[in-house]
Amino acid sequence: MCRFLSVCPSVCDKNRLDNNSFLCIQLLDACVSNCGHSFHLEISSRDFVTECKSVISKGHPKVALKLKESLKKWAEGDFKSDPALK
């Protein structure tokens, strides 16, 4: 897993509300929109999804909501047409 993807969930995992968490999710969204298939494979990997589940269950509710919205957007948009990303 690329270094950014291993750091980003841990930034959001703290149970506090700060700009770093939202900026990290925003950066992830920009990467998903602009990067290629290899980045998409990393985002859909079991390790990354496990980290996201941890953020959603243990993180601040507003951060968890933003991450859930982003995951849903990626699943219904960028990842929908590629069977390798489901």
Image: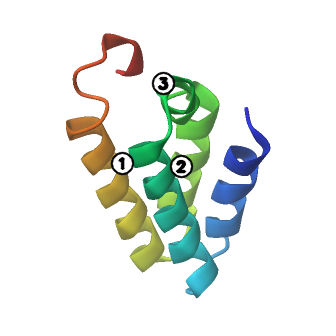
Task: Kindly state the secondary structure of the residue where label 3 is placed.
Answer: helix
Question: Do residues under tags 2 and 3 come within 8 Å of each other at their CB atoms?
Answer: no
Question: Do residues under tags 1 and 2 come within 8 Å of each other at their CB atoms?
Answer: yes
Are there few (<14), some (14-19), or many (20+) residues within 10 Å of tag 3? some
Which is more N-terminal, label 3 or label 1? 3
Question: Which residue is the site of mark 2?
Answer: 52
Q: Is residue 22 left or right of residue 68?
A: right
Question: Which residue is the site of mark 1?
Answer: 71
Q: Where does residue 48 sit, x and y in percent of width and height? A: 60, 38
| Amino acid bearing label 1 | Leu
Task: Kindly state the secondary structure of the residue where label 1 is placed.
Answer: helix
Quadrant into which the C terminus falls = top left
CA separation, marks 1 and 2? 9 Å
Are there few (<14), some (14-19), or many (20+) residues within 10 Å of tag 2? many
Question: Which residue is the site of mark 3?
Answer: 37
CA separation, marks 2 and 3? 20 Å
Q: Quadrant of residue 82?
A: top left
Could one spot residue 16 in this view of the protein? Answer: no
Residue situated furthest top in the rendering: 83
Quadrant into which the N terminus falls = top right
| Amino acid bearing label 3 | His
